[in-house]
Amino acid sequence: MTAEPLIRAEGLGLSLPDRGARAGRLGFGAPPLLDILQDIDLTVGAGESVGLVGESGSGKTSLGRTLMRLYRPTAGRLTFEDRDITGLGEGALRPLRADMQFIFQDPQSSLNPRARIGEILSQPLHAFGRAKGRRDAWAQASALLERVGLPPSFAGRYPHELSGGQRQRVGIARAIALKPRLVVADEVVSGLDVSSQAQILALLNELKRDLGLALVFISHDLSVVRVLCDRVVVLRHGRIVEEGTCEGVFAAPGDPYTQELLAAIPLPEVQPGWIFDDARGAADQVDGASAGGSGGAR
Ligand SMILES: Nc1ncnc2c1ncn2[C@@H]1O[C@H](COP(=O)(O)OP(=O)(O)OP(=O)(O)O)[C@@H](O)[C@H]1O
């Protein structure tokens, strides 16, 4: 890693109450704790993209949420730009929240169905004092829509009026509204068809490059990580079993578990070349948007 460290986890651990034990418990007392993450050492540099991979239940989402301090670590240390944020309370974290954004797998459930897209995008701008009134927020929302390859007129629409790929673009627009330094994207292309997947990956790649974002990209799909990320971190049972550049790990996986994961990759549906497409141009063609741009999905 050559970039300035943006977020750094050292010996990070997370234990959470066992949900199953809590549900089935008859007696009193606290439910037993489960070790979800253990001994995580991970640094993500400014502008760097790191893929978190591993099978279901390996701890990818928990690690993403802990890096964003949506969970408080129960062991180790977490620093953001050299500031220790391990134990900060919500009040102290609030100014940092603008710098760290999460993109969810399912934009359908993360976008308020009763709000117009313009209102959804205006909300964080108002909450963080980044808009001079409603008109300015709406103008910024329209610009954000264009930035992610959607027509500004979509500001007046409701989430259910958009396709899955278009909703995910709105999720991305909301995540970049506050010009964050770090974005954690959790399985953001999982529910999409292959051409929408390729376009969303191309858009993320373009935003990463243009905005200098650090990206933590969570995916169970190694072929997707391979096209988007600089580095890959392999999780198993809440521990890192392998880490390295995508090039190095994919060419010569050192850990037997990584070898197994790689052997299980189907023939790639997302081609590495797709990432170099003009993301907005590609959006015009498949999402039915008409925001301008001249590229095309292959
Ligand atoms: N809030 C919670 N309370 C208790 N246990 C949890 C909680 N969240 C996750 N877990 C457990 O932690 C482990 C890791 O879950 P996590 O969702 O982080 O894995 P994942 O790799 O993201 O899985 P998937 O790919 O299925 O989303 C699982 O065993 C899960 O049941």
Image (tube, rainbow, N blue to C red):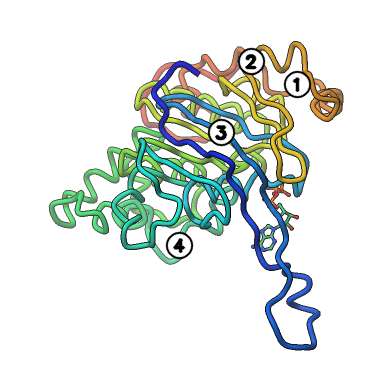
- For this orientation, the residue located farthest to the bottom is 27
Q: CA distance from mark 2 to mark 1?
A: 9 Å
Give the residue number, with chain letter if any, for mark 1. Answer: 268
Q: Amino acid at mark 1?
A: Pro
Query: Which residue is rendered at x = 66% and y = 27% of the image?
Result: 224
The tag earlier along the polypeptide, 3 or 2, is 3
Q: Amino acid at mark 2?
A: Pro
Q: Amino acid at mark 4?
A: Asn
Q: CA distance from mark 4 to mark 3?
A: 33 Å
Q: Amino acid at mark 3?
A: Leu
In x, y percent, where is residue 267?
Answer: 81, 21
Mark 4: few/some/many CA within 10 Å (<14, 14-19, 20+):
some
The tag earlier along the polypeptide, 4 or 3, is 3
The tag earlier along the polypeptide, 4 or 2, is 4
Give the residue number, with chain letter if any, for mark 3. Answer: 42
Do the CB atoms of the residues marked 2 and 1 lie less than 8 Å apart?
yes
Q: CA distance from mark 4 to mark 2?
A: 34 Å
Q: Secondary structure at mark 4?
A: loop
Give the residue number, with chain letter if any, for mark 2. Answer: 272
Q: Is residue 24 left or right of residue 184?
A: right
Q: Which mark is residue 112?
A: 4
Depth check, front residue: 207 or 92: 92
Q: Is residue 271 left or right of residue 145?
A: right
Above or below residue 70? Residue 30 is below
Task: Give the quarter of the image for residue 189.
Answer: top right
In x, y percent, where is residue 285?
Answer: 51, 27
Q: CA distance from mark 1 to mark 4?
A: 34 Å
Query: Which residue is rendered at x = 52% and y = 43% of the image?
Result: 168
Depth check, front residue: 237 or 260: 237
Q: Secondary structure at mark 2?
A: helix
For ligand 1, give the image quadrant. Answer: bottom right
Do the CB atoms of the residues marked 4 and 3 lie less than 8 Å apart?
no
